[in-house]
Amino acid sequence: MPNDIGIEPPVPIDPLVPTIFHEPWWLSAATGGRAEVVEVREGGRTVGRLPFVKETRFGLHRSNMPTLTHFLGPGINDGSGSEPNRFVKRQAITRELIRKLPPFSSFRQKLHRDMKDVLAFQAEDFDVTVQFTFEIHPAAHDVIWKAMRDKTRNVIRRAQESYRVSNTMDPESFLRFYAANLGAKGEDANIDLATCGEVATQALDRGRGHFWVAKGKSGDPKAAIFCVWDARLCYYMLSTRSADSSNGAIPLLIWHAMKSAASMGLVFDFDGVANAGSILLYAGFGGTVSPRYIVMKSSPFYKALRKIRRVNPELSNRFL
């Protein structure tokens, strides 16, 4: 059944397609149709899939995360059986997927939450780092509300007095608003806005994404966020606000998105902690900290270019 804003809950999860970011339509929209995949088959069926996108510049092949694609990594069907046997099977499938990848000068992926360890990647000489995110697990709205910090609740209460939250925003309007807010600060977008528009359109068409917008008394947008979801998680993707908006506008919209996620029985994922400011903001919503692993592997030549970049960015930008 639809939730309180008319959104249909998503379908059950396929272990080979563990997130929305693994779905073929998402990868096609986010990469302009350039996404590829390696597979492992066993007994006539696919048991492992690893999507990636390859870019080539000046003879250097590299793979990084596509636009708006927050997580990737292997999708694995490890079958049934004891956990020790399934662990061994997951390791074997992951290592075979890695070995099926084409040669790269540089490869980097941020792994989805089901990747509880990265031992297979380490065994294949990948470097590993970790980024933490906050998760809000589904519960009754009043339970989630009470779990927040008093300061966060007060900020949201004040924002409710100034803004009306609407769901009527399309991708083109959001991106115009996003670009205008950046321009007002003298900044440029660090993501491909055209690709963002295509991804957002595809998500909305499939009932897998939503905009929330805070409108002032005049009816003009003052802040907006965009979220998408799959069978288990709702992901906080993009946000923007005008210079004349209050600092409570975004928390107000996040609160609405969190309630929607809870109504669908989904975990709300803040998608990573980037700085001290985001730690304070996200912690205020009462979430739990969860790790997301990042795996990387580069050739010696590519590593040398990265060192040069630290000294002479203009020269190495031609290659990296």
Image: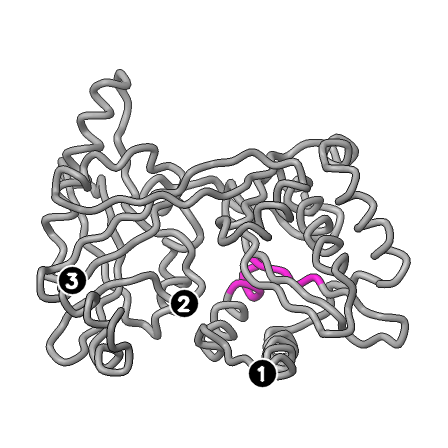
Give the SS element for disc 1.
loop
* 3 or 2: tag closer to the N-terminus: 2
Give the SS element for disc 2.
loop
Q: How is the image coloured?
A: one colour
Residue at mark 3: 303
The disc placed on residue 288 is: none
* 1 or 3: tag closer to the N-terminus: 1
Residue, x 34% and y 46% (percent of image)?
111
- Please tell me how crowded label 1 is: few (under 14), some (14-19), or many (20+) other residues with Cα within 10 Å: few
| Residue 270 shown in magenta | no
Q: CA distance from mark 1 to mark 3?
A: 33 Å
The amino acid type found where label 2 is placed reads: Thr
Residue at mark 1: 186
Give the SS element for disc 3.
helix
Residue, x 67% and y 43% (percent of image)?
1
Q: Are marks 1 and 2 in contact (CB under 8 Å)?
A: no
Residue 74 falls in image quadrant? top left
Q: Are marks 1 and 3 in contact (CB under 8 Å)?
A: no
- On screen, residue 275 versus residue 28, left or right, reads right
- Foreground tag (1 vs 2): 1
Residue at mark 2: 67
| Residue 210 shown in magenta | yes
Magenta residues, as a range? 203-212
Residue 246 falls in image quadrant? bottom right
The amino acid type found where label 1 is placed reads: Gly
* 1 or 2: tag closer to the N-terminus: 2
Query: x%, y% of residue 11?
Result: 51, 44
Query: x%, y% of residue 160?
Result: 86, 55
- Most extreme residue toward the front is 311
